[in-house]
Image (cartoon, rainbow, N blue to C red):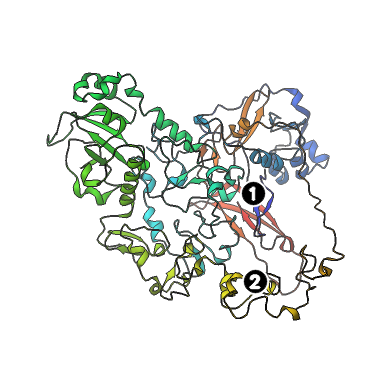
Amino acid sequence: MTGYDEYIDSSQVTIYHLIPYCRRPDQNEIKDHLSNISMNNIDKIITFNELYKQGVTSQQLLEWSVPIDIAEKYEMKVLDLTKVFYNCSLPWFGPKCQYRFDTKLPVSFDDIVRRNFIHRMAHDMLYDDNIGTCYSFLTNCYNYPLSVCLDWREICDGKLDCTNGEDEKYCQLLEMNECPDDTYRCHYGGQCIPLTFVKDGPTSPDCLDGTDEIELYEEELYRSKSACLTFPTFRCEEHTSRHLRSFPCGDGQYAFSDIGLLSAIRLCANGRDMIATFYRMRFLSRPLESLFVQMFDSTLVSNIDILKQILLNSTSIYMMIPCESIGRKCLTNWLFKVEVYYAYSKFHFIYLPNRLLIDFALLINPDFICFNPKDCPALTYCVIDIGINNGLVCCAASELSNELLNGGNEMQDALEKLFIRCSTTGIEQSCSHSSLFHCSLSLKCISKHRLVDGIIDCYFEEDEVFPTCQLNDSKRFICESEQNKCLSPIAVQNGKNDCQNEEDEMTENQRNTLKGDVPFALLCDGKNHSLLLKSNETDETNCQYWPCNNPYVRCNRLQNCADGTDEHNCPKLKCTWKEPTINENISGIKNWYCNRGIIIHFNDNKTNKCLCPPSYFGDRCQWQNQRISLTLQLVHRVETYTIAIFQIIIMLIDEQRQITSYHEQITYVPKRDCGTKYNI
């Protein structure tokens, strides 16, 4: 079924979204039993042979809510003519009339999808694990109990989320990818897109990271009222963050930094950050809750027998581990470890037995800080063997941080700095590919496209001071006030002034105005353009010779003539569109039941099922799918005027040159669809 018909965004680019919603069960879901379907659901049972004799078309079958695969087989005449067709009574549908939507109104499926998403409110059932989404195709990436499971947007994001590092494997290939001159290279993903797709509308990004469009800086919108909450389209489902160290909400929205443990502010409208916070809180102090208050002022070693019972096999962030040093370089027989819940849980605090139990409980001034050497290779210079043999390496806390880690915000700030140091330093003495830039002080290799992009990728900021004009990259922005400064495209209109005269934050019209090339529509419009106020002449000079009643100001609801003649006899425009009034209560919980899918009822109205878009599968659309997404735009050029209609069939061919069973088709009418983008 076609999900969303057409959208016309603010830049007047028509975008056609073809989103088939289907039953997409996983292997564990019990199949629907169709033997006891109520006959009340069925209006008529008739053979396909009789349908052909009556001249019923495949289009009519679709209007009767027949599954699209049956309609296609009917059109191709490959059905067994002796088999029967179940013509369903309203509102039932399905091969045997076993499903119905959660509405009693006679509305189209398109309207059902729109209403489901438009009426979604911030998620109230915060701790329902089944509503969260997971990408299940990588192993050892479910980091319970400290966080929610992996979102596909966390792959190749610079953080190791899987214990075997599989989520960051081969990501350097994206960093090294180069694009042909007639294409645009997406900043982080390294994908290549046509130049015609660049800056064709802020709500129509074609890069996964959205860097082909100017970002809409609406922080409050992203924090609490993200449009992705109410939009099931490409700009959300096929979208990652352009901000490093951001937290993906699982639906295209993101929080601008890692989530804190005790944050009371919901950053994700769907509640994914709150679910993660809940898990962290749930396992934070549970093992220590059974201890008496007076014990917290005593040492760990004095409570060793009690702590063994609750921490040796603990699944919480608190653990007690024996010395496992191969060389028996143990500082003590027992070590007490806490997995820190800040900075993406990259760090582990180690306490020696002579420390107070309260220090261990509240994460105050650890003796050692441990980490995975793959996460922070540049910090391994201070590693010492303290008897841990679980893949972690440890440094004395004083070697890694000069600040006191007394818990609370101070500790979070110190660990954030340490995490940034991990992320922006390396041990590479040189780079293996010509497309990479070597940060000589930070010892890290990054793509040359990341140079002077307004984002510090190298700890000592070598990437932001490099003279990038010598790269001869025609897609870079040259500061007119600093001719030797060439900015990355994503540094233009990013909310930061990178050029001396701030021209990088101006629109193209504003830059032309600054040169004296004033857009015609601004001349004598009664407003002095701020960029021309310092000039001898402005866009309002000599306007007495300019007719006040002209086609550019006629009937614009502003009085340009003193006598108001430019607004006389104007047609009265009435907006005829009116949002339909629907007297039906819509349950927010039901809207969330299928995650990003649509809830349906099975047979007796008591069993809930889900129709999932291609991005998801499972009994509640909870699993993120592997898929191939396509955006295309068709151009039809002819020298003479002709009326043409094209029927385009899109099929996927695998590596063995076998055509997959899934395909899509588009009816393209150049006169109607010129400039239309298709998201499939």
Q: Give the residue at the far front of this rendering.
A: 562
Instruction: Give the amino acid type for the residue marked by disc 2 in the picture.
Output: Asn
**Residue 546 visible in the current orientation:** yes
Q: CA distance from mark 2 to mark 1?
A: 46 Å
Determine which quarter of the picture holds residue 608: top right
Decide: few, some or many residues near mark 2? Use Cα within 10 Å; few <14, some 14-19, many ≥20: some
Pointer 2 or 1: first along the chain: 1
Q: 534 or 206: nearer the eye?
A: 534
Q: Give the residue at the far right of this rendering.
A: 569
Q: Disc 2 marks which residue?
A: 528
Provide residue 599's location: percent of width, then percent of height.
Answer: 63, 33
Dot 2 and dot 1 residues touching (CB under 8 Å):
no
Provide residue 50's location: percent of width, then percent of height.
Answer: 80, 36
Q: Disc 1 marks which residue?
A: 18
Q: 461 or 622: nearer the eye?
A: 461
Which residue does the image show at 55% across and 30% down from the upper left? Answer: 125
Provide residue 77's location: percent of width, then percent of height.
Answer: 72, 44
Which residue does the image show at 43% across and 74% down from the upper left? Answer: 482
Q: Which mark is residue 232?
A: none
Residue 52 falls left or right of residue 12: right
Helix, strand or loop at disc 1? Answer: loop
